[in-house]
């Protein structure tokens, strides 16, 4: 089961990394997607990652917030993380402004098994 997360929780997580909300539209869209029971776990996480890593809704700590969510997802679903690969994927998605959900989900699935 994919983690349940609210916008308020995301804001608290990011605030812990020194950021503040700049724009909430992409987060609202991603949170709506994670509540869709027809989508798989990695696709739901991919929507959150795209919202955070590509749309940069926070003033600071976007990559750290995305990584925190991935670790929480892995822990909740009893998955193992390839830490080096996950950090690489985080940076790569952010640098390339990768928006394709399937590609992001595939990258997550390879780093979190």
Image (cartoon, rainbow, N blue to C red):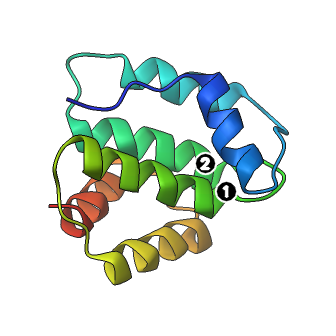
Mark closest to the chain's N terminus, 1 or 2: 2
The answer for how far apart the CA atoms under marks 1 and 2 are is 6 Å
Q: Can you say whether 63 is above or below 9 in the image?
A: below
Q: Secondary structure at mark 1?
A: helix
- Residue at 58% across, 42% down: 51
- How would you rate the neighbour count of disc 1 (Cα within 10 Å): few for under 14, some for 14-19, many for 20 or more? many
Left or right: where does residue 21 sit relative to residue 90?
right
Q: What is the x, y in percent for residue 58?
A: 77, 47
Q: Secondary structure at mark 2?
A: helix
Left or right: where does residue 66 sit relative to residue 7?
left
**In the image, which disc is placed on residue 91?**
none
Name the residue nearer the viewer: 97 or 67. Answer: 67
**In the image, which disc is placed on residue 62?**
1
- Residue at 67% across, 56% down: 62
Residue ID for mark 2: 52
C-beta proximity under 8 Å, tags 1 and 2: yes
The quarter in which the C terminus is drawn is bottom left
């Amino acid at each position: 089961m994919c983690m349940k997360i609210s916008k308020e929780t995301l804001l608290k997580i990011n605030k812990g990394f020194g950021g503040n909300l700049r724009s909430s539209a992409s987060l609202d869209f991603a949170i709506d997607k994670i509540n869709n029971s027809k989508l798989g776990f990695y696709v739901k996480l991919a929507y959150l990652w795209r919202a955070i890593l590509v749309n940069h809704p926070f003033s600071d700590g976007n990559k750290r917030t995305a990584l925190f969510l991935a670790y929480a997802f892995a822990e909740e679903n009893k998955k193992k993380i390839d830490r080096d690969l996950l950090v690489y994927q985080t940076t790569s998605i952010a640098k390339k402004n990768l928006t394709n959900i399937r590609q992001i989900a595939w990258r997550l699935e390879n780093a979190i098994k």
